[in-house]
Image (cartoon, rainbow, N blue to C red):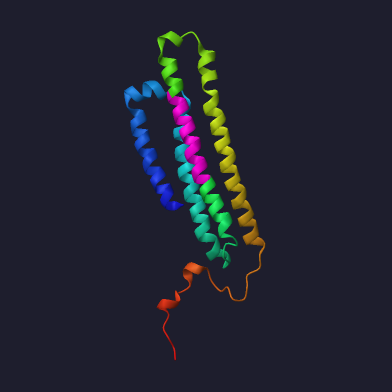
Amino acid sequence: SVALAGAIGAMAGVLTAVMALRSVNEVTHFTTATAALSSHLMYAFFSMVMFGSIYYIMPRLLQKEWPSAVLINAHFWSSALGIVWYLASLYLGGWNQGAQLNDPANHAEFLPIIESLKPYLVSGTLASILIGVGHVAFAISFAWMLAKRRSAVESSPTLFNTPPSLQAKTT
């Protein structure tokens, strides 16, 4: 999750520079593309860093393992795919919206431009639902972890245990 956040952050930095170019900014300014860039930085980058940190810190803090790898995978993949889908919808919709707003033939017709944005917004809403499914998986996993009792065998999180191949053999 943190590695993906690094890639997302780098991509957001490049897109920030590209969207600052005059020729691109003329099309994307005041469109959903600027909202996509804000979401890209705040949601895609920041939330992936935070979730990755929580997945790393909580087992060490509570001295318990996460109860379900299936829920972790569901959270990661639905969030990652949902974010990509959401950003693609807003970026593409914003480019389309900006191109139509800059077209002199459409200058007086604002409502059709907004109506042409509807499929992108519906797509973004469906992507948000997918992200929400991932967050529900995280919430279930987090609550389950807090509620479960630590077993007697479980003394420390997996990553703090020495792998059997590295343990000194005592005979």
Q: Percent position (x, y) of residue 36?
A: 47, 33
Q: Does residue 19 appear to the left or right of 72 in the view shown?
A: left
In the rendering, at what x and y percent does residue 147 appear?
67, 62
Q: Please determine whether, in this image, residue 132 is positioned above or below residue 89.
A: below
Quarter of the image where the C terminus is located: bottom left
Along the line of sight, the residue nearer the viewer: 15 or 106: 106
Q: Main secondary structure of the magenta part?
A: helix
Q: Is residue 153 above or below residue 117?
A: below
Is 84 part of what is drawn in magenta?
A: yes
Direction bottom: furthest residue: 171
46 inside magenta stretch: no
The residue positioned 32% from the left and 22% from the top of the image is 23
Q: Position of residue 143 (x, y in %)?
A: 65, 56
* Residue pictured at 37% horizontal, 34% vertical: 16
What range is drawn magenta here? 79-95
Q: Position of residue 48 (x, y in %)?
A: 48, 48
Please give the name of the residue rendered at 59% of the width and 39% of the height, measured from the top-left corner.
129
Q: Residue at x 52, y 51 (%)?
A: 51
Viewer-nearest residue: 113 or 60: 113
Q: How many marks?
A: 0
